[in-house]
Image (cartoon, helix red, strand yellow):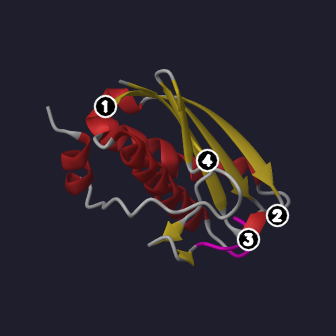
Amino acid sequence: MATAEERLAELGLELPQPPGAVGAYEPWARTGNLLVTSGQLPWRDGKTLLFKGSVGRELTIRQGYDACQLATLNAIAQLKDALGDLERVRRIVRLEGSVNVAPGHADSAPNVLNGASETLVGVFGERGRHTRMIYTFPEMLLGTACLIVLWAEVE
């Protein structure tokens, strides 16, 4: 059975360095066997915010999908930072995704958030199956396309 790191490589994906907080908060918190990330944005190298704008106006559904995938990779990087080893993730319990959508385009949000869901299952296999919640907004902080939060059961 392939490890999460091996699955990342098979998918042609790389984990970025975990982005630092952009405010007065922690990038992740652990209580018992529950690890929760703060909202993760589609940062490249923790410096450049990619995918700015609203899905259905400045961004296509595919670009929104890619934004969610990148934000999810940043969230997975936070899990690795917290645990040292992704094999200590027992299960992704919940995915919360906030998506910046133009008026009249809220129905595209589930397809956009699949960029996160499919990445989690691709990386963690059965351990990546999760519940999820989608929030849609006509405008988001820093003009970002999405924000991803993960809840994980860990060893």
Q: Which residues are magenta?
A: 51-58
Disc 2 marks a residue whose amino acid type is Glu
Question: Which is nearer the eye, 52 or 141?
Answer: 141
Q: Which residue is mark 2?
A: 139
| Residue designated by label 4 | 38
Q: Answer with mark 2 or mark 1, whichever residue precedes in sequence.
A: 1
- Identify the element where label 4 is drawn: loop
How far apart marks 4 and 2 lie (CA) works out to 19 Å
- Residue 83: horizontal and vertical position, in percent? 36, 39
**In terms of depth relative to the viewer, which is nearer, 49 or 154?**
154
* Residue type, numbered disc 3: Leu
44 or 32, which is in the foreground? 32
Question: Closer to the observer: label 3 or label 4?
Answer: 4
Q: Between disc 4 and disc 2, whose residue precedes?
A: 4
Q: What is the spatial separation of the Cα atoms under label 3 and label 4, in whole angstroms?
A: 16 Å
| Drawn side of residue 60 relative to residue 10, left or right | right
- What kind of residue is marked 1? Arg
Q: Quadrant of residue 50?
A: bottom right
Q: CA distance from mark 1 to mark 3?
A: 33 Å
Q: Gap in Å between the C-alphas at discs 4 and 1?
A: 19 Å
Residue, disc 1: 88
Is the residue 83 above or below the residue 66 in the image? above
Query: Residue 82 in magenta?
Result: no
Mark 2: few/some/many CA within 10 Å (<14, 14-19, 20+): some
> Of callouts 1 and 3, which one flags the residue occurring earlier in the amino acid sequence?
1
Relative image position of residue 152 (x, y in whole percent): 48, 31
| Count of numbered circles in the view | 4
Q: Amino acid at mark 4?
A: Ser
